[in-house]
Amino acid sequence: MRGNGPLSSIAAMPEIARVTFRQLLGRRRTVILILLATLPVLLAVVFRLGNQINVERFTRSSFDVIAMTILLPLVAILFGSGAFGAEIDDGTIVYLLAKPLSRWTIVAAKALTAMAVSILLTGASMAIAGAIELFPAGSEGVSATEAQILAMVVGSVCYVSLFLALSLFTRRALVIGIGYMLVWEGALSVMLPGIANLSIRQYALGASRAIYELPLQEARLTADTAFILSGVLVVVALAIATWKLMRFELPGGTD
């Protein structure tokens, strides 16, 4: 089913975004993610109370161990796989697809909403933590905080795009995402450094180098390479998601 025109489809994006936003934040597990996002902030408070202003140590303990390894992938994968997940699970996606809207508009609205929520949660966490612990270190601390926020942005966009597309092919997108996070970006990335070109974690770390060379990070990509690979991933993933959505069958006919 095709829309009445690009303008009518674009005009519907805010409403699609509103519904998606409510779906993503209306679940109990979101509360757990918000609590998880407070960990870097709490750690920053502990550092400050101990009068420890150390960019290297805080980057290792907060950004690497908590934000990049747990917070970012878990939040972005959850929101990415959940953008269509609820509607697919309960069958209400047929009502969305029955509307005269371009499929790319639906994908774009849901992807942008999931990206925004993920960036807000992870980026705000690192921004507040950096303001508490790293800003007192001067320009180095400010640059380190900006680099960490940029990593959250790039990582969120990539994770959301990939797992939003995957959720249209399987209901196990979240499970696959957790496996990807633990196995591919965890164990295998340590044993096989060559997989950096296929690691969203490495894209995020590489992108952060455009602002600041974060200490003790195993970034294996240059900033330019990281941005290029990130862009390719996002474009391909969202194109595949749009293609898949166009092939959803509706009662009484096909798209």
Image (tube, rainbow, N blue to C red):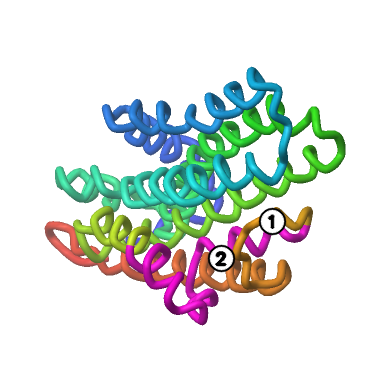
Query: Residue reaching furthest right?
Result: 139
Which residue is depicted at the point 55% across and 29% down?
43
The disc label shown at residue 49, or none: none
Residue 52 in the image: above or below residue 241: above
Badge 1 amino acid = Ser
Q: Which residue does the numbered mark 1 point to in the structure image?
A: 208
Counting other residues with Cα less than 10 Å from the Cα at mark 2, is it few (<14), some (14-19), or many (20 or more)? many
Query: From this viewpoint, is residue 122 visible?
Result: yes
Q: Quadrant of residue 104?
A: bottom left
Badge 2 amino acid = Gln
148 on left or right of 176: right
Residue 198 shown in magenta? yes
The disc label shown at residue 202, or none: 2
Which residue is depicted at the point 64% across and 18% down?
49
Image quadrant occupied by the C terminus: bottom left
Q: Give the image location of residue 119, x and y in percent.
A: 55, 41
Which sits in the foreground, 71 or 104? 71
